[in-house]
Image (spheres, coloured by chain):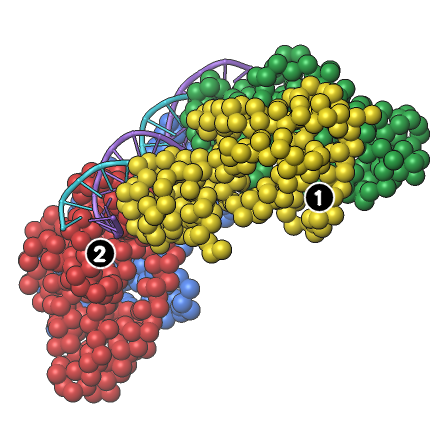
Chain colours: A blue, B red, C green, D yellow, E purple, F cyan
Amino acid sequence: MNEEQWLKELLKFNEEDGKWSEKQIKILEAAIEMFAEKGYAATSTSEIAKRAGVAEGTIFRHYKTKKDLLLAIVMPTLFQSVAPFLAKEFAKEVFENQYEHYEDFVRAVWKNRYEFVKKYLPAIRVFWQEIAFHDEIKKQFETIFKTHVYEKFKKIIEHFQEKGEIVELPVESVIRLTITTIAGFFAARFMIMPDYEWDDDAEMERTIQFLMNGLAKK
Amino acid sequence: MNEEQWLKELLKFNEEDGKWSEKQIKILEAAIEMFAEKGYAATSTSEIAKRAGVAEGTIFRHYKTKKDLLLAIVMPTLFQSVAPFLAKEFAKEVFENQYEHYEDFVRAVWKNRYEFVKKYLPAIRVFWQEIAFHDEIKKQFETIFKTHVYEKFKKIIEHFQEKGEIVELPVESVIRLTITTIAGFFAARFMIMPDYEWDDDAEMERTIQFLMNGLAKK
Amino acid sequence: MNEEQWLKELLKFNEEDGKWSEKQIKILEAAIEMFAEKGYAATSTSEIAKRAGVAEGTIFRHYKTKKDLLLAIVMPTLFQSVAPFLAKEFAKEVFENQYEHYEDFVRAVWKNRYEFVKKYLPAIRVFWQEIAFHDEIKKQFETIFKTHVYEKFKKIIEHFQEKGEIVELPVESVIRLTITTIAGFFAARFMIMPDYEWDDDAEMERTIQFLMNGLAKK
Amino acid sequence: MNEEQWLKELLKFNEEDGKWSEKQIKILEAAIEMFAEKGYAATSTSEIAKRAGVAEGTIFRHYKTKKDLLLAIVMPTLFQSVAPFLAKEFAKEVFENQYEHYEDFVRAVWKNRYEFVKKYLPAIRVFWQEIAFHDEIKKQFETIFKTHVYEKFKKIIEHFQEKGEIVELPVESVIRLTITTIAGFFAARFMIMPDYEWDDDAEMERTIQFLMNGLAKK
DNA sequence: CATGAATGAGGATTCATTCAT
DNA sequence: CATGAATGAATCCTCATTCAT
C-alpha cells in the first residue's frame, strides 16, 4: 500500500472518498510527520507548506485554520483507533462464539491493532501527544470511548465472566487491566523504546500469557 | 506540606538547598502549571511572568532561555521519578530480605511512587508530554534508565526468579510487564481518567494480584 | 534621475535587473537614510518599516535578518565605490594613452568619483560608518582593494613613473598620497563640513595642483 | 606609563586630578575598548560592567546614563586631540620664530600628534566613530575647531604666506590640505590598514616632503 | 559607596492568516 | 484553485536604569 493510500484509508471516517485532492494529501502527510516530530504548537504552517511542496496559502484553502488541520489528522485517527468497536457486528461476533475464549478475542484485537499501529504510527503519536492540550479532542475521545468501546467491552467481559473464564473483578478493572497490558506493550514497543530489538511474536505470546494468567479465575 | 516546600524538595537533586529565591520558585510553579496545561511550546513567557507575578525580564534573569526553564522542571522530575533506584542501598535491601517476596517489593515501590505521583503530578505531566519533543530529555532519560533502573531491576528480578517465585521469562519482559502494569494504573488514574471515582486501595489490590498471578511460576 | 532609479543603479552589481519590487526599494531607501543618520545598531527595524511605509514583517520577507539588510546596502556600495577599477578596460585605457599625463588620469577619476559620491552619499556614509564594526565588510573591502584597486593603480603609477612624470617614491606611498588627497577632499566636503560653502571646481583645481606639485619629479 | 596613567592624563581636561576612583577608571577603560570594537549602540552596559569587573549598578553610580559614559570618553578625547591649539602660547611660539619654517611647524605637530594617536588610539576611534551619530559631539567639535584650531592655524598660515614660504591659496584650502595630508596618513596607518608593515619614519618623511612640495610657492 | 535583583519597554524575528493576482 | 507577498500581533529575549540591601 503506498503512502497516499493509507492516508485515504485513515481518512475514510471523515469524508466520502474521492474528495481528497493530491495537494490535500501532501499537506496532511507533511503535517502528520512534523506534528509527530516537533508537536503541533512548535510546527509552523510555513514549514508544513515547504515540506508538502505547496504554497502557504494553499494550506488555508483546504483547512480554514491550523487547528482544523490538526483535527483533520486527529479525529480520523481517533475513530480508526477504536474502529473494531465501532463496527456494528463486533460484539455480536463474540457472542456468536466467533471467539470461544477471552484469549481468542484478545489475540484478535491484538493482531488487528498491531497492524493498525504499525501503519498509522505517526498519526497515533500526534493523537496522543496533542490530546493533553486540546479539550475538543479529549471530549471527543471520552464520548467515543464511553459510548462505544466501554459499552461493548463490558458486554464481552461479562460474557466471559459468566462463562467462568475470567476472574470476577469489577468490569472496569478487567477492561483497564486488559487495555493497559496491551497498550503498555504498544507504548514500549513503538513509542518509548522503538529502537530496542523486539521479537514481536514472542513478546506478544508472553504478554498474552501474562494477561490470561493475571485474569484467570483461580 | 505547602506548595513551595514540595518544589524545593523536587529540586533537591539539581542544586544545593537555599539557592532558591522566592521569585524563582514562583516562576517555576507558574511554568509547571502552564506547561502541564497548554504544553511548553504553546505557553508564552509573558503568560508565565503574569501568573508568577513577576516581570517578564525576571524570568530570563533566573533562566537564560525558555528551554532552560523547561529543563529546570524536567530534569529534577526525571531524577526524582527514579529516585528509589538511584539510592545506593536500594537493591541491597532486597537481597538482605527486607522484601521477602516479589510482591512485597512491588508493594513498596507502588506506595512510594504513588505518593510521589500524587505530589508532583503536574511536573510529571510536563515531563511525559515534552519528552517526545526534546532529544536532550529523551537521551537523559535513556541513560538514567539503562544505568540505574534497568540494572538494579534486573538483579532483583533474577533474585526472585532464582528463588522460584516468578516465571522464567526474559528479565526484560518481566521488567516491562511489571512497569507497564504499575504505570498503566498511574496513567489511567492520574492522566487519562483523573475524574473517574477511583478506590485507590482496592484498585491497587486488584492490580497487584493481577500482576502476581500474571508473573507466578505455574 | 529619480530616487528609485539611482538605487536600482547602485544595486546593479548585486543581482540582475527587474528583481527589485517596489516595497523592497522602499525598505532599502528607508534603511539607508536611517542607518546613515543614526547608525545601524541604533536603528530599529520598526522605525525602518514605518519610514518605508510597510509592515515590519515585510522587511523580513525580503531580508532574512537586519544584518542582511545592511549588507544589501553596503556590498553594492563597496562594489560601485571602486567600479572604475573593476572595469576590464580601465588600466588599458591608461596605457593606450587615453590619459597622456597622470594629471589627466587623476582628473578623470576625480570627476567620475565626484558624481558617484554626490549621488550615493547616504549609502557611502553607511559603508564607512559600519565598516569599523563588521568584519565581513572589512574583509570584503580588503579583498576588493588588494585584487582590483591596488593592482591596477600600481601599474598606472609605474607607467607614469617610467615616463618620468612623477616622483620615484614607493608605489604604495604614491597610491596612498593620491587617494588620501582626493578622499580627503571628499571627506571634508561631504562628511565633515557639508554645510560650508564650497566652490567645488576651484577646490578641485587647487587640490589637483597640490597633488601634482607634491608628486612632481624634482 | 601604565594603563591607568594615560587615562588619567586623557581625562585631565574634564575634571580635577584625584577625583578618579579605581572603579571609575576600570569602567572607562572597559567602555573605551568595547565602544571602539563594537560601537556605542551595540555595546551593553552589562558587558562593560563584566569587562570592568564591577556590578552593573556601579556604572550608573558614576555616570548617570550610558550616554554620559560616552561623553566622558569622547569629550576629553576631543580636547586632547586639539590640545596643542588650546595652549595659550601655541601660536605665539610660531611667531617668535620657534619654528623657522612651515615645515618645522608641521614636523612638530606631526610628532606631537603621532605620539598622541598611538597612545589614545582606542579613544580616538570611539570619537570618530560616534561623532557621526551624536549631534552634541559634532557641535562641540565644530565650536572647538572654529574658535581654537582654525583661528590659530589661520594666523600661522598667513604668517608663512607673508614670509613667502607657502603658496598663496585661500587659507582654508591650505589648512584643509595640510590636515588632510597628515590625518590621511594617520587614518591609513592606524584605522584602515593597521596591519600593513609601516616604516613610520620613512613614510613621515615622504608625506612631509609631499606636503611641502605641494604647498611650495612656485 | 557597591551591589545585583528586578523591571518593563523595546528589540529582532516568526507566525497564522488574508487576498489580489 | 493555487500562489506567495503582505500583514501586524505575538514571541523570546535584551537592555538601560532603579533601588533595597
Tell me the kind of residue under disc 1.
Met
Q: Residue at x 57, y 44 (%)?
A: D117
Q: Nearer the viewer, residue A208 or B147?
A: B147
Image coords of residue A11 (percent x, y): 39, 39
Q: Residue at x 68, y 14 (%)?
A: C199
Q: Nearer the viewer, residue C77 or A210?
A: C77
Tell me the kind of residue under disc 2.
Ile
* Disc 1 element: helix
The answer to whether residue B175 is above or below residue B117 is below
Foreground label between 1 and 2: 1
* Disc 2 element: helix
Q: Chain of mark 2?
A: B
The answer to whether residue C201 is above or below residue C213 is above
Q: Nearer the viewer, residue C206 or D49?
A: C206
Image coords of residue E5 (percent x, y): 22, 49
Please rate how many residues cluster around mark 2, counting C-alpha atoms within 10 Å: few if below 14, some from 14 to 19, many from 20.
many
The answer to whether residue D86 is above or below residue B118 is above
Please rate how many residues cluster around mark 1, counting C-alpha atoms within 10 Å: few if below 14, some from 14 to 19, many from 20.
some
| Mark 1 vs mark 2, CA separation in Å | 74 Å
Image coords of residue D79 (percent x, y): 48, 35
Residue B124's tag is: 2
Q: Are marks 1 and 2 in contact (CB under 8 Å)?
A: no
Image coords of residue D10 (percent x, y): 46, 43
- Give the quarter of the figure containing the N terminus of chain B: bottom left
Give the left or right position of residue B27, taking residue D218 as reference.
Answer: left
Residue D204's tag is: 1
